[in-house]
Image: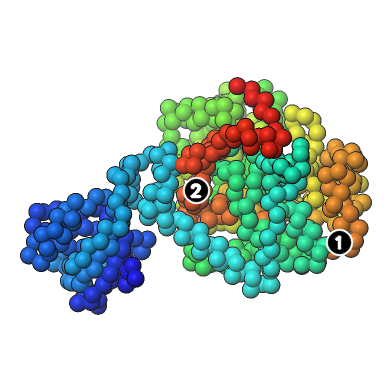
Amino acid sequence: MYRSHNCGELRASHINTEVTLAGWVQKSRDKGFIVWVDLRDRYGITQLVFDEERTSKTMMEQAQNLGREFVIQVKGNVIERASKNPNIPTGDIEILVSELNILNKALLPPFTIEDKTDGGEDIRMKYRYLDIRRNPVKNSLIFRAKVAQEVRNYLSNDGFTEIETPYLIKSTPEGARDFVVPSRMNEGEFYALPQSPQTFKQLLMVGGMDKYFQIVKCFRDEDLRADRQPEFTQIDCEMAFVEQEDILNVFEGLTRHLLKEVNGVEIEKFPRMLYDDAMRLYGNDKPDIRFGMEFGELNEVAQHKDFGVFNNAELVVGIAVPGGNTYTRKEIDALIDWVKRPQVGALGMVYSRCNDDGTFKSSVDKFYDQGDLAKWAEVTDAKAGDLICVLSGDKNKARAQLSALRMELATRLGLRDPKVFAPLWVIDFPLLELDEETGHYHAMHHPFTSPKPGQIELLDTNPGDVKANAYDLVLNGNEIGGGSIRIHDKGTQAIMFKHLGFTEEEAKAQFGFLMDAFEYGAPPHGGLAFGLDRLVAILGGQETIRDFIAFPKNNSGRDVMIDAPAPIDDAQLTELSLKLNLKS
Ligand code: ASP
């Protein structure tokens, strides 16, 4: 038996018990005649004591030579500590060691195994197994497991069956590039790793499984924008014989359950917002509604004067920054520079100060009088003491830019409290999205999403106006999940593929299996998927998903610990019938 107790377990009630513990040396203090060692395992820290009077000379020497992170086993008696440590649960006791067994030595770790470590991100990722010994990472992984467990509990109790789907498949278009795997047995052919189990879960519905879920890895070869991973985990679900309302209810229930069980937060009904309203009021399809600062559209009250910038703009839109009138001229100039950064891309920003005496002072006083500015204040809901920030230009761009500014200012104002949870559904997404570069429409969600009833004809005339039975769950300004009611008949699916630019042959080659299945009695169905990594990070009150992934990849998609990806040798290439054609 390696241990009778763990390192977080012993209390005053154990005094005078003989125990065996095993763990890592966190640190030791050597006073010559007495040595204290902090022994750590996943459960906590227990203090060991070796003292000259009661410990043999050899063991005393051994204790003095213990290095950080040595793995040891000790036997000893639980005794009361002379100076207690109220900060740790085992702080009332220590172990007077009678037997010390070094199970494994350790090199000096390249960073300190402390909550606040001296190790930077790169070195911690290279030695992730050491990083995992630190409380913040360890606790995040345990937290993730709890969330996953609660998901399983909830869905299983609701009659969902957890079913695995294959990883070696054919492309699933979720809007990213596929990772591909060469097939040795099928020369010149490749599997794709699933961007999601989308088509399989639909086939499970055709198979009559009715309520499916899976906590599953998905793979997307995207340029890694901030805080994305090339492989990530979804809580993937699908249900048959359902309408949108049924799905929203089940997964609102799941989210409510998680918030309650994991965070102790009770939220009644989640608000629902139309996609069009989210874009109009927040410039964003994943609005953070923990705070106000809603957009006010100013075209009507700002396009009647000689200010060409506004007159030529498709949209003039502003927000009121609470208390923003205290900003100095210099601070406002810095804000203007902030919106002009290439990442945001605004050409400039107009502002109006809302003075305490009810007057206004704007950067465009030459064009707008007090009466005009009062209207701006009304439209943006600005109060005395606020600052109105106004952007203009192309509608979509101005909205995106103002949304970025809104989030930035809210962060600076401390309005994005990670302990406050504000979930909402965004519904009625457009079916298609115009790709500005190619001028082609592509599916906003994915090609299997069904248009709203009665809108299919619109596809020919106004494709951009067609709405879908598609919905996202948004939490604190993050999309944590999304899904749709699916197309379940071959005819509609064929029309959809046509509009997405597939020829009949292409659609058949890529998705013939699904179209065929639709001819054998496909039930109406729909579903959604939550991003588990992000959900866990938000519930855990953190911004970055990396801390909640045991072995994450860096921004270039590399695992720096195992050093992957890596070249393979010629023999392996030959076996796969592959020849490299490297650019560099
Ligand atoms: N497969 C979709 C996704 O990965 C989710 C869904 O529609 O159920 O976003």
Task: Using residue 12 as the reference point, say whether residue 201 is left or right of it.
Answer: right
Could you tell me which residue is drawn at 51 percent across and 64 percent down?
A: 146
Q: Amino acid at mark 1?
A: Ala
Q: Nearer the viewer, residue 204 or 545?
A: 204
Quadrant location of residue 3?
bottom left
Q: Kindly identify which numbered label has been placed on residue 522.
A: 1
Residue depth check, mark 1 versus mark 2: number of the one nearer the observer = 2
Answer few, some or many: residues within 10 Å of disc 1's Cα (few below 14, many 20 plus, some between 14 and 19): many
Q: Nearer the viewer, residue 535 or 503?
A: 503
Disc 2 secondary structure class: loop
Q: Do labels 1 and 2 touch, CB within 8 Å?
A: no
Quadrant location of residue 297?
top right
Task: Using residue 465 as the reference point, say whether residue 354 is left or right of it.
Answer: left
User: What residue is disc 2 on?
Assistant: 551
User: Can you tell me whether the CB of the residue at mark 2 lies under 8 Å from the nearest atom of ligand 1?
Assistant: no
The number of numbered badges drawn on the structure is 2
On screen, residue 490 above or below 221: below
Could you tell me which residue is drawn at 24 percent across and 68 percent down?
A: 75
- Residue 148 x/y as whole percent: 56, 62
Could you tell me which residue is drawn at 58 percent across and 23 percent down?
A: 366
Task: Using residue 421 as the reference point, say whether residue 499 is left or right of it.
Answer: right
Distance from label 1 to label 2 (Cα)? 39 Å
For the N terminus, the image quarter is bottom left
Q: Is residue 522 visible?
A: yes
Q: Amino acid at mark 2?
A: Phe
On screen, residue 403 above or below 477: above
- Residue 238 x/y as whole percent: 73, 61
Q: Is residue 462 visible?
A: no
Q: Nearer the viewer, residue 483 or 249?
A: 483
